[in-house]
Image: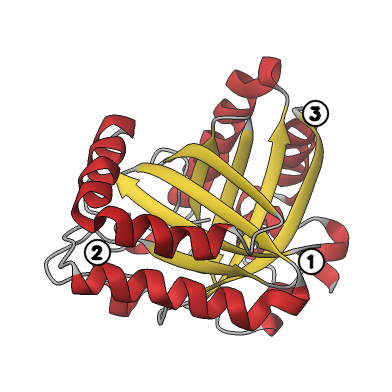
Amino acid sequence: MRIFKHGLILLCTLVFALNLANAQDMPTMLAVHTDNVKFEMMPQYESLAKQMKEACVKHKIADANWTAISVEDGRYVYITPISSMADLDKNPMGNLSEKMGAEAVKEMLGEMEQCYDSHSDSVVHRIAELSFMPDGYNTDGKNHREYHLLYYAPKDRQAMKEAMANVKALFQSKNVKTGYDVFHSGFGSEENYYMVVISGKDDIEVAQSGLANKEAMGDEGQATMFNVIKLAKRYDQVEAEIRPDLSYNPSNN
């Protein structure tokens, strides 16, 4: 697709997890762009990312919309909800080029590209039927994220889905008060994976809620979780932060 080929998806997808209060409002398809920023270039990169946001605010760019996330390993992830794959072929920054000047935008992007040696694009899907959002739970003010990525072989697709559904059923039966979102890999991903996203005000709150849930579910919880883990060929866990200072939503400006 044109935007993927030219790397312009950086602008339309500046998730892995939108900070929405109500689960029913959560989009089901998300475009994700990841910049693997060099540690020594992070201050410069963030300064440029803020300039990009400020330019969109100044020029009132209505078609752009992204949530920014900084990951502990130097990745900067940008997420934009999309309604179909056709949205990936749009350039919402066209208006910025017209108002700010194509050369100025090109120069800003060029400076950002000096801060990383690689980047990638993909699509992820929120799986509502596997996500657990109890009544009264929301992520307002909870910008810390803990991501659990469970990679599995294609042959285990149905078994993994059923095992994930059993975890949700257990959470419901134990009347757990804290929720989590589940996403699944899509276009652009080399491997199949489920990603479980846990939100909190900080890493301490996430850890405390995890311990409380473990105690509430007891041995049954360990057995149910093991049925998921045993199907995973690989498991990753990373910490990250939602970055409102780098995110842009025209409805908030």
Q: Secondary structure at mark 3?
A: loop
User: Which one is in front, 121 or 177?
Assistant: 177
Point out the tag, 3 or 1, that comes first from the N-terminus: 1
Disc 3: CA contacts within 10 A as few (<14), some (14-19) or many (>=20): few
Q: Which residue is mark 2?
A: 21
Check disc 3 and give the amino acid type: Gln
Question: How far across and how far down the image is residue 52, in percent?
Answer: 57, 42
Q: Secondary structure at mark 1?
A: helix
Q: Which residue is mark 3?
A: 114
Question: How far across and how far down the image is residue 235, in percent?
Answer: 63, 49
Point out the tag, 1 or 2, that comes first from the N-terminus: 1
Residue 33 at least partly seen:
yes
User: Which one is in front, 196 or 214?
Assistant: 214
How far apart are labels 3 and 1 at the CA level? 20 Å
User: Which one is in front, 217 or 26?
Assistant: 217
Check disc 2 and give the amino acid type: Ala
Q: Residue at x 69, y 75 (%)?
A: 156
Check disc 1 and give the amino acid type: Ile
Q: Residue at x 30, y 80 (%)?
A: 24
* Apparent side of residue 218 relative to residue 127 in the rendered image (left or right): left
Question: How far across and how far down the image is residue 229, in percent?
Answer: 56, 57
Point out the tag, 2 or 3, that comes first from the N-terminus: 2
Q: Secondary structure at mark 2?
A: loop
Q: Which residue is mark 1?
A: 3
How far apart are labels 2 and 3 at the CA level? 36 Å
